[in-house]
Image (cartoon, rainbow, N blue to C red):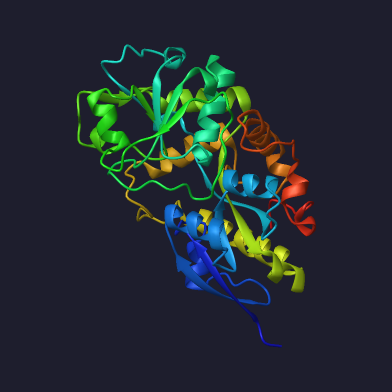
Amino acid sequence: MAKLQLTLACGLYDRTIPLLLGTVVPEGIELNFLPMSPGELFRRQGRHAEFDVAEFSMSTLSHLRDEGDQRLVAIPVFPSRRFRHCDMFINTNSGINSPADLAGKRIGAMEYQQTAAVWQRGMLQHEYGVSPDKMEWFFGGYNEPEVWVERVPITLPSNVSHHVISDQQSLDAMLEQGEIQALIGATPPKSLQEGSPNVARLFPKYWEAEAGYYRRTGIFPIMHTLVVKREIYEQHPWVAMSLYKAFLQAKTVGRRGLPGSGTLFCMLPWLAQHLDDVQQLMGDDPFAYGIRANRKVLDTFYAYALEQGMIRKAVTPEEIFAPETHSAPSTL
C-alpha cells in the first residue's frame, strides 16, 4: 500500500532531526520535512493552514479554536519548551529593581498572543501580583522596524491599554532609549546582545529564578505543539497516533545521542554536567509528550489564556487534542 504523502513544517531540533534524516519514519506516512522558523511558520499556518502537519503556537491555536476555527487538529507533541524569566528585559534607568516594579510601566512585546508572553504575564500576575491591566503595552517590530501585522487577528481585553508602534521604530531601540521601560520576548534584544549599558535582564541570575520556579510549581512551560490539517485527519484518523509515536521515537533517539561517546554532541563544554544537573532537578524526560504527563502545565496554560482574554471560555486539553491521543503514553 502506498504511503500517505504529508508535508511537515517544523523547526530543526535534536528531537526532530531524526525525522528529517529518515532515522525515524512514521508508520504509513512519507514526510516531506520543511525546516522553518516559528515566526514565518505560525503566521502562514495560522492564516492559511498551508502545511499538512506543522509545529504551531499553543496560544494561537487556543485562540483560533475559541473563535470556532476548526481547521487544525492538535497532537500532544511539544517540540518547544522554555522557561521565560530569561526573556524579560528592562531599561536600567527605569527604576525597575524587581518584577513588582513593572506595575504602571510601559512594556513592549512582539504580540499579545505570543505563547511566551502568555506564560510571562501569567508568571508576573501569579508570582508577583502584577496583572496585564497594570501595565501599558506596546507592540511592533522587535529588533528592527517593520510594518506590524498580527499573525492572526485578536481583540484584546478592554482593560488592557495597548499601542502599535510606528513602522519607523523598533521595540529594542525604544527600550534602549527609555521610551518603554521593559520588554518581554522570546529572545534577547539586539541592544542586550551588543552590551548596551541601558539594557539588562529583569532577572540577572535567571537560571536560579527558573530553577526555583520549577521547584515551586513543577512547570516547564510548553511553547509549541503539533497540528495536522483537519481534512487529512478526518480522512485518515490514524495519522494522529502515527505522528505522535514517530515524534516520541525521534525525541528518544535525539536524547540518547546527547551524552555522546567522547566527542561533544553540541558546543557546550560542560554538556555532561548540564545533563546531570537537569536530570537531578527535572527527571529523565523534561520534554515529555502526551496529555497525562503534562496535565498541570496544560491546565495552567489554558487558565492563563482565559484569564488574559486570549480565550473567552474555559477549555480542557481533551477538547484541543485528537481523541486518539488522550491516553497516549509518554514513553515508547
Q: Is residue 280 above or below residue 77?
A: above
Residue 316: x and y in percent read 76, 41
In depth, the one of 214 and 315 nearer the eye is: 315
Q: Is residue 236 visible?
A: no
Residue name at image x 29 percent, y 38 percent: 170
Confirm whether residue 124 shows in the render.
yes
Question: Left or right: where does residue 103 sit relative to residue 287?
Answer: left
Q: Which one is nearer the viewer's eye here, 82 or 67?
A: 67
Locate residue 249, reporting x and y percent.
61, 61
Asked which quadrant contains residue 110, the reply is top left
* 80 displayed left or right of 266: right
Assign the C terminus to one quadrant of the image.
bottom right
Picture coordinates of residue 106 (x, y %)?
Answer: 39, 22
Where residue 280 sits, quadrant-wise, is top right
Q: Quadrant of the N terminus?
A: bottom right
Name the residue rendered at 46%, 23% in the picture: 209
Number of callouts: 0
Q: Is residue 169 left or right of residue 327?
A: left
90 versus 280 height, above or below: above
Residue at image coords 25%, 41%? 168
Q: Residue at x 20, y 24 (%)?
A: 197
Dividing the picture into quarters, in which one does residue 91 lie?
Answer: top left
Q: Position of residue 125 (x, y in %)?
A: 56, 20
